[in-house]
Every structure is written in C-alpha cells, then in structure tokens.
C-alpha cells in the first residue's frame, strides 16, 4: 500500500495541476487547455526527474549535499549551444528540426556522462568522489571554453544564445514532450525497482557487499539511470541545477524516512509541485515578470548553503 505521506503529496500535485489548468479559463477553452496541458506535462516531468535522480545520486555518492548537475551537465549543455551558434549562426540554429536536435543533445550528454562514469569507476565504486571531482573540473573547463567563444559572437547572436541556454518551460514541441515522457517514465520506474538495493547501498560499500549486493556494478547502473534522467530533462528545457537538491532536501526533511521506495516518489512529487506552483504564481499573479528557473536556482542555492553551514547534530 502506498505511503500516506506520498499520497498526500500526490493529491497536492493534482490540486496544484488543476489550479494551473483552470485558473481564469476564458476564450477558446479547448485551445488554451491544450497549451496549458503541454506546459504542465513539461513542469511535472522535469520536476519529478530532478527530484528522483538527485535522491539516487546522493545515495550512491554517500553525500546529501550533492546534485547530479555538479558533474557538469549544465556546462555541457551551454557549451553545445555555444558551439551551434558559433558554427552555424543563430538563424540556422533556430531553424534546426527540434526532434533531432533534442535527441542528439540528450544522447550526447548521456553518452559522455556514462563514459566518464565507466572510465573512472572501472576499478570499483570506491572512486565515486574522484568521479565527481573529475566532472567538476570538466564542467569548469567547458564553462571557460564557452565563455571564451561567447566573447567572439555578435551581440544579436549572443542574445539568442543566452535565451537558448536558460531553462524555459514555454513553447515546447509536443513531440519532444512525448519522447521525454517515455524516456523519463521508464527511468523513473527503474529507479523504483532499484529502491530496495538503494537501501542496502546506503549502508556503505563494505556492508552492502556483505549483504550480497554487487555494489560496484549496481552503482554504475544507478549512475547510468541518473544520467538519462538529467540529460533528457536538460535537453528538454535547459539546466536547472539546484531543483533536485531542493526537492530531495525537502523530502528528507519532511518525511524523515530512509526507505527509497518512499523517498524517490516523494522527492519526485515535491520537485513537480515546486515547478507547478511556481509557474502558476508567475503566470497568474505576477504576469511572467520573473523567471521561474532563476528563482528555483536561488532557493536551491540557499538550501545548499544551509546544508553546508549546518552544524552536525
């Protein structure tokens, strides 16, 4: 039977989604509902994948301060957009077919992340920290290269690049939403199937191996699932680095439960709630005068600082 707290979060998401869809609904109802439903699907997909992937990543990394974005997905995404604008020009980049562009970007980010994980962890999952540090260094290098290339762009092309590099939940192709829903849905189901083994992995490498878990192989599998979720969501809307940390931290603080069968869906629901409630507020109350991604990053950054500075109990 599903946990009661998870059910309450699910009901909260249903209520927030209904408010998002039906608030001040006027004019051509069918057309407006269709547009809002597409945006709602993106918000739920991105928020849920961020929350679930962060819980899994923190478990295999044995650190509650980390988020998958620290490995450099956001830097790689911005670098790819910069190279496209620099090599093709902003007009041709904007004219690229959205589906092939999305698939190539998601596949490239996933492939590079899996290659990094496999290369560093080939001698065992005890090198997870070294893998994370390598990802941080690669991300710093990509940001530096992207920054250098951006200085060579015309102001008009730089403006297009800035818009393409910032997370946006508006005007997405419904075909992209369908592909992302399938990939993220399969990854989320796999996360739930791994929940029991994640409970064992959270005990540490030595204890997990004593209990019969093939720890090294399992960690690599979990990181591959995380890579798919982060790469697909980043290719879909752009980088939102601290959303997962915010959702995972709220799930752990409110539920105080170590079971991943509860933590993973709770973090996914909280991540989706944050985006749906935030987008509803910005669109209905503030008239899109603020950027949801910027506010989420700011709040996530504050949570990160609070976790770092908090004294151990």
Image (cartoon, rainbow, N blue to C red):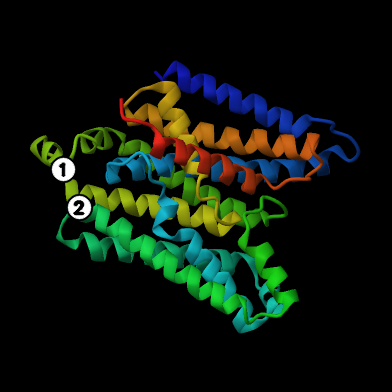
Q: CA distance from mark 1 to mark 2?
A: 8 Å
* Residue sitting at the far left: 210
Q: Is residue 193 left or right of residue 203?
A: right
Q: Disc 1 on helix, strand or loop? A: helix
Q: Which mark is residue 205?
A: 1
Q: Position of residue 118 (x, y in %)?
A: 26, 62
Q: Is residue 300 left or right of residue 71?
A: right
Question: Which residue has dot 2 on it?
Answer: 125
Q: Position of residue 146 (x, y in %)?
A: 53, 73
* Residue sitting at the far right: 27
Looking at the figure, which quarter contains the C terminus? top left
* Residue sitting at the far top: 4
- The residue nearer to you, when weighing 305 against 265, is 305
Q: Position of residue 171 (x, y in %)?
A: 72, 54
Residue 45 seen by the camera: no
User: Can you say whether 217 is above or below 154 in the image?
Assistant: above
Q: Earlier in the sequence, mark 1 or mark 2?
A: 2
Q: Quadrant of residue 110?
A: bottom left
Residue appearing at x 64%, y 66% in the figure = 98
Q: Residues within 10 Å of mark 1 (few under 14, many from 20)?
A: many
Residue appearing at x 42%, y 22% in the figure = 255
Q: Residues within 10 Å of mark 2 (few under 14, many from 20)?
A: many
């Amino acid at each position: 039977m599903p946990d009661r707290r998870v059910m309450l979060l699910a009901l909260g998401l249903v209520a927030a989604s209904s408010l998002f869809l039906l608030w001040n609904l006027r004019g051509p109802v069918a057309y407006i509902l269709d547009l809002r439903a597409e945006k709602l699907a993106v918000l739920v997909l991105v928020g849920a994948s961020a929350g679930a992937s962060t819980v899994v990543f923190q478990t295999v990394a044995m650190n509650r301060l980390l988020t998958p974005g620290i490995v450099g997905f956001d830097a790689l995404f911005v670098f790819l957009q910069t190279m496209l604008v620099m090599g093709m020009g902003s007009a041709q980049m904007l004219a690229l077919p959205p589906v092939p562009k999305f698939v190539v970007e998601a596949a490239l980010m996933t492939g590079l992340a899996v290659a990094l994980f496999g290369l560093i962890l080939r001698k065992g999952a005890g090198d997870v920290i070294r893998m994370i540090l390598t990802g941080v260094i690669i991300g710093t290098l990509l940001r530096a290269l992207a920054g250098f290339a951006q200085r060579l762009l015309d102001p008009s092309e730089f403006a297009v690049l800035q818009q393409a590099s910032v997370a946006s939940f508006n005007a997405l192709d419904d075909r992209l939403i369908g592909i992302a829903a399938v990939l993220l849905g399969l990854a989320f189901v796999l996360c739930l199937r791994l929940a029991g083994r994640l409970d064992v992995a959270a005990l540490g490498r030595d204890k997990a191996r004593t209990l019969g878990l093939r720890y090294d192989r399992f960690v690599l599998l979990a990181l591959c699932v995380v890579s798919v979720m982060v790469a697909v969501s980043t290719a879909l809307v752009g980088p939102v680095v601290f959303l997962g940390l915010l959702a995972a931290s709220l799930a752990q603080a409110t539920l105080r439960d170590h079971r991943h069968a509860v933590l993973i869906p709770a973090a996914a629901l909280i991540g989706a709630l944050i985006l749906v409630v935030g987008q509803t507020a910005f669109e209905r109350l503030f008239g899109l005068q603020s950027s949801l991604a910027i506010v989420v990053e700011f709040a996530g950054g504050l949570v990160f600082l609070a976790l770092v500075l908090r004294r151990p109990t």
